[in-house]
Amino acid sequence: MFGYFLTRLGMFIPTFLGVTLISFMFIRVLPGDPIIVMAGERGMTEERYQELVEKLGFDKPVLQQYWDYLTGVMQGDLGESFVTKKPVWDEFFALFPATMELSICAMIFAVALGLPAGVIAAVNRGKFFDRALMSSALVGYSMPIFWWALLLIIVFSGNLGWTPVSGRIDLLYYFPDVTGFMLIDSLLSGQEGAFKSAVRHLILPTIVLGTIPLAVIARQTRSAMLEVLGEDYIRTARAKGLSPSRINGLHALRNALIPVITVIGLSVGTLLAGAILTETIFSWPGIGKWMVDSIFRRDYPVVQGGLLMIAVIVMLVNLLVDVLYGVINPKIRRR
Amino acid sequence: MSLLEIRNLTVEFATASGQFRAVDGVDLSVDKGELMAIVGESGSGKSVSMLALMGLLPWTATITADQLSFEGIDLTKISARERRKIIGKDIAMIFQEPMSSLNPCFTVGFQIKEALRIHLGLNRKDRHQRAIELFDQVGIPAPESRLKTFPHQMSGGMNQRVMIAMAIACTPKLLIADEPTTALDVTIQAQILDLLLRLRDEQGMGLVLITHDMGVVAETAERVQVQYAGQKVEEQPVADLFRTPRHPYTTALLNALPERATSKMLPTIPGVVPGQFDRPKGCLFSPRCQHANDICRSLPPTPHSAQFGKARCHHVEQITAGELA
């Protein structure tokens, strides 16, 4: 198992290098000059401009710049933001908990609803629930999430006034960051109503971000279950006189989980991409909004560092998925 | 009262091109401790009729029967929940493919103990003890350590033993074995059959053996039922069936046995079992029967009396009298 883990980890290296190269080149291909953006409307003198070009290393050949960046990354240095002058690493970890909290909630939402829905649809194949679920899953999957977010805001925040429009918590509350997770921090602060407020702020972003994974998971669970339900061992389980809930929920689901876990792992990538939109709409102070802002500012180190970190997270999650395969299905385990 | 009594069982499947009748008016009765064999080619409805009894057919199947009773309880008239108390406990079934019939995600120990907990309510320690006993009884070496293995870590023969151990876990009164040896190699086949016969003697359970191997039938069964295209075409005690087969299909099956071959070329039955679209109007066997005439092709035969092996053939009397050969 450990050897297997190391092999998988070794396969990270080319992906990792590829991501650094692509993110590095991608931002430089975009038109726009970070120095001019930094100067803003006031502009700057030609001398000052040359000074900055030299300071930021833009006078060197591009390959030389990439090499400098890569050696920095290898030493754990992602560079400093052009705008805030703070290390990218620090900024990332200040903002990442917000994104992680939102993503985890969205994932829990998607799995908690998608798995049972898929199982029930498969068991009641062709009946009303199945058809209704599969059509709504298709709608959920194909709906643009910014539009879905606006709809929900209009109805639940605007018309009904049930949920706040933006942010992570009401401005009334103030407490120190302990974990960076608002749900936990608000509980730790002991302030009355703080936790409730944090939850209310989370509801809409969670639904918006979780909708696509929910649809994908429900559909995948259904089709995996349909396949498994036709297997001989399910017939054996029924021949033993087990109850339908035990057969579907234990014997069949455990086997159906392999493809479902795969899409859950892949959804993490979609989720982080979706987080960028969702965070922008709900003014959620996470890495999504930070990345979008940095792209507009041509803040090269932040864009590169942010992309790299997201890619590493997605790779780690998929590594975890590979390990989970073996836990769920012993046949995949290395002997 | 017989242990199992089936009267006029019909199973139809809804397919994209209409209803398909897989079992057509089959009768079957099994007494306590009796070994009944059902033989016939693939597609003759042997398995389907037993799966119907167990309630294991998919939702596309429609089951109708005048009687489908086990120990006097009509299984069609009780709720699914009550039926589950009988299925797996008093009636158990083992299947053709041992490798795919066990759940790959769970240890064999888990799978056998599950039945013990649900039907007998044994506690953890008793379950473990009983599982070891059962593994020992079906001839699995080192039973205690085997409980922890997964199905893919064992051979087909061992898996079939696990299936048998699972089936007899709650000492059923009736065991249905659906081609239990087909997927196994010949030496293992004999061992599994011996095991089934020994268990039947030890526990006095009725045994229904579904097979298409006439050799197995000759060695094991007491009564034999021959099925063709969803119908029962003949039923006789095993010795009588082999000595004087009544139905031409049975005769043809017996002639196809290598042991009985008189020439170098093994006789075969031309054609295949009729399917959904080529079902003959009269006798279902008529397109392949050497004695078929116009009556056979237009009028479906009805079963004869037990004296003529309940044969479903227009010519039974002539065949018996030796007029047709």
Image (tube, coloured by chain):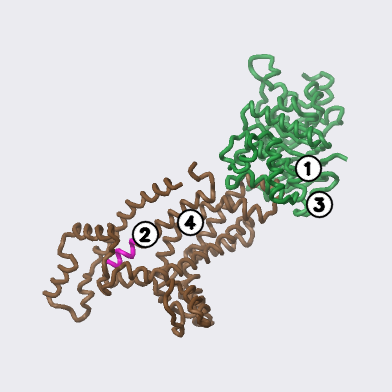
Q: What amino acid is found at the position of numbered circle 1 in the picture?
A: Leu
* CA distance for labels 2 and 1: 62 Å
Which residue appears at 54% of the width and 48% of the height? A329
Which residue appears at 48% of the width and 56% of the height? A263
Find out whether the residues at labels 2 and 3 contact each other: C-beta distance under 8 Å: no
Extent of the magenta region: A301-308
The label on residue A263 is 4
> Which quadrant of the structure image shows residue B103?
top right
Find out whether the residues at labels 1 and 4 contact each other: C-beta distance under 8 Å: no
Which residue appears at 41% of the width and 72% of the height? A279
- Which x, y percent locates residue B262? 69, 14
Query: Few, some or many C-alpha atoms within 10 Å of disc 4 (few <14, some 14-19, many ≥20)?
Result: some
Find out whether the residues at labels 1 and 3 contact each other: C-beta distance under 8 Å: no
Q: Is residue A147 left or right of residue A292?
A: right
Q: Are marks 4 and 2 on the same chain?
A: yes
Chain letter for the brown part: A
> Label 3, on which residue?
B77
* CA distance for labels 2 and 3: 60 Å
Find out whether the residues at labels 2 and 1 contact each other: C-beta distance under 8 Å: no
Q: Is residue A177 left or right of residue A130?
A: left
| Image depth: mark 3 or mark 4 in front | 4
| Helix, strand or loop at mark 3 | loop
Residue A303 in magenta?
yes
